[in-house]
Image: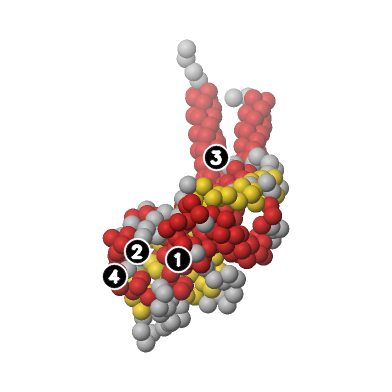
Amino acid sequence: MNRKAAGILALSAIGFIVAVMLFYSYADKQRPGGETRYLGATEVNIFNTYIGTEKQLLYIDLIAEQSLNKALEELAPKKEELAERYQDELLAGFRKNFEKRLSDFNNIYNSNLLIEDYELSVGENSVKGISEKELNITTEYIDYRFKPGFRIFY
Amino acid sequence: MKTKKGQVEDMFGDFIIAVILIIAAIMIISVKADSHQTDVSEIIASDKSSLRGIDLLTLLRMPVEHPFLDKHGSITFAEFFELVAKNYPEISLEAGWLMDGNLVEDEIGVSDKIVCLSELRELFSKRLGYSRWHFKAYDKESMEMIFECNNIGLLYYPEGEVTYVNTTIPLSQPGKNIIIEMEAVA
């Protein structure tokens, strides 16, 4: 091998090694969304937001169930005729008990949900609450809005 | 084609250099690639574990399938925790029936808490499908632990593998809430 060829070969070899080292040094930082992000981070964040809303909906369902049980307890002597004659009393009892518990929900989840936001009705062996108001959880990636409605059977 | 002695030595030298360079490149690539993969998967694993929060919420909505509880009307795990809280620090007349079904018992003389028995552990394990789990219930106001239940061995796992998730559920008395915390190893 002549001297010129040896020089080119040596330079090429050094260049190759430097290129490989540089590529892998910077490859770590080349993640979707920049240096602080990694593959799947945004999706995980969105799912966590969804889980946050599910926690709130579980709480609403449980207080609705407790309010219905309490209202039924207060109407106990009339329970057999409940479906036909005492729906108004049941609804009034439910409303009173649900309102008390809604303030706990608002304190815990820093929300402002009022009994007036609900359209309450008694259906077939159930109490239904439809909320016109939307609750939301806002993060860097998503503004997740949901209506905290419920239907509880007795 | 004939080669001279000097040319053979040159080719042998080139071959040695090429082999050394190839080995060096492979070592660099494998070391850096491994470290990159480890970093990313560890971060994802720790963040992904928070997604198990949905398992806790699903469990709380599910019925506790047990003949004893079915006799009292089917109850969900959330309602079960509510009954547990009613029996703390003293056994409640209203909710004391929970002690009769071989699921929990009063830990007399040890603490005010009620403790879970093997039948209840099986019910949790059946629903969760985790190899190790640990439930704790705290009074939200005082943060006093009122109940715990686990299958053994959680403490021997490295910290990174354990998931911690929690949620707040209301008690029937307005203004009272408990925090349910779940630690689990998949």
Closest to the camera, between mark 1 and mark 2, is: 1
> Are labels 4 and 1 on one chain?
no
Q: How crowded is mark 2: few (under 14 residues within 10 Å), some or many (20 or more)?
A: few
User: Circle 1 — which element?
Assistant: helix
Percent position of residue A50, x then y: 59, 48
Q: Mark 1 points at which residue?
A: A77
Q: How far apart are marks 4 and 2 (CA)?
A: 14 Å
Chain of the residue under the numbered disc 2 shown in the image:
B
Amino acid bearing label 2: His
- Total numbered labels placed on residues in the image: 4
Between A94 and B173, the one lying in front of the other is A94
Q: Distance between the residues labelled 1 and 2?
A: 20 Å
Amino acid bearing label 4: Asn
Q: How far apart are marks 4 and 1 (CA)?
A: 33 Å
Residue drawn at x 66%, y 64% as measured from the top left:
A103
Chain of the residue under the numbered disc 1 shown in the image:
A
Chain of the residue under the numbered disc 4 shown in the image:
B
Between B129 and A148, the one lying in front of the other is A148
Amino acid bearing label 3: Ile
Disc with the residue nearer the chain's start (4 vs 2): 2
> Are labels 3 and 2 on one chain?
yes
Q: How is the image coloured?
A: secondary structure
User: Circle 2 — which element?
Assistant: loop
> Are labels 1 and 3 on one chain?
no
